Image: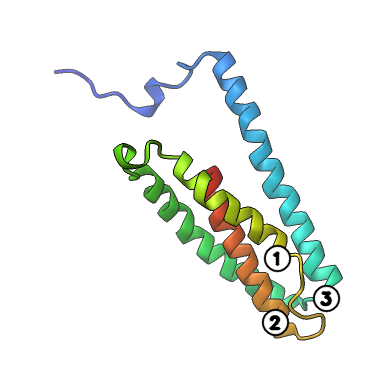
Amino acid sequence: MEKSKTNSDFVGKLPRKDVFIYSLGYIPNTFLAGVFMLMYVNFFWNYLGLIDSLFIIGMIIYASINALNDPLTGHMSDKTNIDKWGSRRLIYIKWFGPLWAIFYFIMWFPWSYDNQILIFLQFVLSICIFDTFLSLVIG
């Protein structure tokens, strides 16, 4: 009887060159998300003055939605019909990439400067939509 292969059987099987190139390709994703989060927090907290408690509630909502949307968008892209769309990734880049760019641009225009509820709603909606589109385009 043949022993089934586990993930540990495949560790170290990729050439170092491939691992290096993959790592280089992942750097822009990490950089983009990291810089966005720094600028986003600065924008809502320092510039618009979102109060601490609403900021924390917004981050809890974002974390909950992110915990759901990452597996769902991953599953959706894995189940994409290659015969119909031609690729698992290009269809999401083609349709959600421009929407992601437009939304990224629009979200930097405040809905309000003094109404904490509107600032909070913009904060939560913007970060959740940004992350969902990021998962679809880069995922």
> Closer to the camera, 9 or 121?
121
x and y percentages locating residue 111 in the rendered image: 73, 77
Q: Residue under label 3, please give it.
A: 49
Give, as a three-letter code, the residue at label 3.
Gly
Q: Are marks 3 and 1 in contact (CB under 8 Å)?
A: no
> Could you say which disc has been placed on residue 107 in the image?
1
> Closer to the camera, 11 or 40?
40
Mark 3: which secondary structure? loop
Looking at the image, which residue sits at the far left? Answer: 1
Give, as a three-letter code, the residue at label 1.
Met
> Could you say which disc has been placed on residue 133 in the image?
none
x and y percentages locating residue 115 in the rendered image: 76, 86
- Residue drawn 51% across and 65% down? 65
Q: Residues under labels 2 and 3: Cα distance?
A: 12 Å
Which of the 4 quarters of the picture holds residue 132? Answer: bottom right
- Residue drawn 55% across and 55% down? 133
**Counting residues from the N terminus, which is met first, the one under dot 3 or under dot 1?**
3
- Eye-nearest disc, 3 or 1: 1
Looking at the image, which residue sits at the far right? Answer: 47
